[in-house]
Structure formats: C-alpha cells, structure tokens
Amino acid sequence: MTLKLGTLTSIATAALACIGSAHAVEVKYMLWDSNQMPAYKQCAADFEKKNAGITIKITQSGWGDYWTTISTGFVSGTAPDVFTDHLAKYPEFAKNQQLVDLAPLVQRDKLDTGIYSSGLYDAWGREGKQYGLPKDWDTIGMVVNMEMAKKAGVSLADLQAMTWNPKDGGSFEQVVRKLSVDAGGNNATAPNFDKKKVAVFGYQNPGAGGMMGQTEWSHFAVSNGFKFQDKPWDTKFYYDSPKLAETLDYLAGLPGKGLSSSFENTKSLGSDAMFVAKKVAMVPQGSWMITYFKDNAKFEHAWIPLPTGPIGSRATMFNGLADSIWTGSKVQAEAWKWVKYMGSTDCQNVVAGYGVVFPAIKGMAEKAIEVQKTKGVDSSAFLTMAKSKTFLAPIADGGSEITEMMTAALEAVLVGKSDATSALKAANSKINALKK
C-alpha cells in the first residue's frame, strides 16, 4: 500500500498538533472589567502565536464577586495564575505571601520600567520587591447631562472653569444650583425652589468611599489641602485633618439644600444609574466608566475636569492597575511571560486601539483618546486631570480594617448622625493605633 506525499504531510501535521496540544501549558488569567475583555483576548491570541505551547484562558467576574473568587481561590488552590490587581488590595495579598516577587524577573529580563507613566511601577513595590507590572491608569472627572446644562444656561466653558471651596461651594455650587430643578420647574437659585420636591438633583456624591474616597471625596479634600499619609506604607494617617472634615461636612450638607439626593437613596439606587435615568445632572466618575456612559446614557453628555480647589489647582487620585502572579501557580514561568507581554508595547498598543482604558506606557493614553473621539466621546478631561495635581491611593497594611473603620465614620457623617470632625478624629485614632 502506498500513500501520497500530501497525505503523509497531513498526517504528520495532525500528529504534531496533537502532541503540541497534549503538552500545551494553560495560563489562567482573570480580570473584572468586561469592557476590556475584547482587547485582552486579542493580546492573548497574539501572544499564543509568538509562544507556541502556551494558551491563555481568560475569565471575567464583576468587582464584588471578583475579589471573593480571588481570595477563596488562594485558600482552595483554584486562584488564577495571573490576575488584575488593585493598589488597595495588594498589600494584604503580599503580606500573606500570595504574590510572586517580580523584581528578580524584571532584573533578569532587563525590562525597561521607565516606559511606564511616572509612579505606576514604584506603586507596586515594597522594600525591593515588586508585586505587579503596570497595565493601565485612571483619573477622575465629572460627567454632565449637557441637555440639562444648556437648558439651565450653563455652558461647557462654565463647567470646565468651575472652582470649589468648602465655605460656599464656589462656582461649582452655583452651577449645581442651576442644574437642580424642583417638581414645579424652579431651579435652586430661585427663592421659591422647593427642596423637598426635587425632580433633578444638580450633583450626586456616589457614597462613602472607604479609605480611598476615590470618586467620592478625595479630589475635593486634596484640592482643599488634605493628604492621606506622608508616603506609601506609612502607618500614620491624617484622616483627622480639618481639611477633610470641612470637605465632608460640605458634601453631607448638599441633600439638606436640595442639591443632592440623600445618602440612603444613593446607596440604594447608585449615582451612575441615577444619572442615566436623568435624576441627577452631574456625577463624578473614573475614566474606566467612559464606555459605560457612552452605551447607557442615551442623551448628550460630556466629560469635564474636576473643579479647581482652594489650593489653586485641580486634584485627582492617579490610580494604576497591575497584573500579579499567584505564588500557588504551577506555571509561574509561563505566567511571567504573559504578564510581561501584557505590559509590553505590543499588547498595550492593542489595548489603546480599543479605547476602553488608558494604557500604562507613556504616550498610549493619547492614542486611546483619539480612538474614543472616533466613537463620539471626548475623554480629554481625564488627561487634563492627569496633568493636574495627582496623588496615589493610600497604600498600607491592614487595608480591610482601615476601610471598615473609615466607612463606618463616613456613613455616620453622611446620614447626619455625627459631625465630620468628631467621627474622623475617632476613626483616625483607631487606624493609627493598628500598628502600635
């Protein structure tokens, strides 16, 4: 019996494919943002072509379930090999020895960490160890219902030039008053405005915000002179600062003026959903939500920079995500190849092309902004904020305990059970005593 050459070639190819498949190493990767799935699936496909024998399995889970899955996975041995990590979470994971120290790998492979935007790489290091490789960054801005703004006589230029202070709210409060409308059609600048029958609130604080207040209060407080700690990992916090207290007292006072909904209502409904439903004219949010509002807010809206505060500048938390490797992974060598690829120009260029986040490598954010413009979204406000006063999220051991203490104190202020000075002083004493 004889076989043709083509047939033999096909058989050999099929056999090799089977052998390759049998020995393929699978790297499990997990992220929480569904908007980023298409970009990273493309990165995975490109990676697999360049790394025969390694396959990437990507799974996604919403923010709440995500951290439960990661934490329980550490215990049960089912955690992903690689996962998107957060600055507020990684100190505890590192302390419990759940994260691979990437510093020796970075040094061995001579990675140029200077390609990342300033501060993003260092934020993931401690005492010479490195627990994540940067992937993207975000800042905070405000999204405004421009149909309501125009009807109230507020221009985009007015919104972009807002100032804020905790005494009278500055031009920010004047804008918020114009955007707040009662059931009779009167706005909050009118003497007959009914603050008990408000149809549209001008501004909505999203909630308590825990130890970070990322979208809730940190930008107002830092632009008022507040700082969380002297440097990352310091055990001394300044939550008892009068600058933070007067900021929170101001925000807590907005519902009483009819300019914001109550904390209880917002906690139940969610400020983003209230904006989409046209119950609120303006809310603060992060750049990671650009796609959400583009897809769900079916009316003209615009992103604007945060107001300039009493210190004379705008301020925003500059938060950077990174990819980390679990110490329990059985495929750490392959996991590192994948992490290194996601932090490379090749992958981040792909991510920028999808325009859903701002990649960590310098210059990539501008590309993402151009892509978003082609989709009808001007997200340059976030780049404006990145060039303003920026600050990192507080980084410390015991993040869960600090968040729990701060949440209790902040909620007491926002529901009117305590003034901010008393609540924050008590919470700060407990927090600073954690390491004594």
Image (cartoon, rainbow, N blue to C red):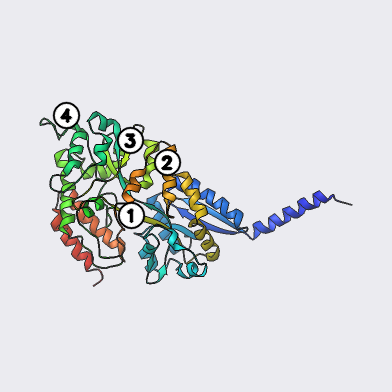
Residue lying at 18% horizontally and 51% vertically, measured from the top left: 310
Furthest residue in direction right, as rendered: 1
Foreground of the two, 33 or 190: 190
As drawn, 53 above or below 198: below
Label ID, residue 124: none
Question: Mark 3 highlights which residue?
Answer: 301
Identify the amino acid type marked 2.
Answer: Gln
Label 1 crowd (10 A; few <14 / some 14-19 / many >=20): some
Pinpoint residue 375: horizontal percent, then vertical percent: 43, 37
In this picture, residue 300 sits left or right of residue 130: left
Residue lying at 47% horizontally and 44% vertically, measured from the top left: 354
Residue 357 appearing in the image: no
Foreground of the two, 110 or 65: 110
Identify the amino acid type marked 1.
Answer: Phe
Q: What element carries label 4?
A: loop
N-terminal of the pair, mark 4 or mark 2, is 4
Q: Quadrant of residue 262?
A: top left
Pinpoint residue 392: horizontal percent, then vertical percent: 31, 58
Label ID, residue 186: 4
In this picture, residue 130 sits left or right of residue 201: right
Residue 82 appearing in the image: yes
Question: Mark 1 highlights which residue?
Answer: 318
As drawn, 410 above or below 203: below
Question: Mark 2 highlights which residue?
Answer: 372
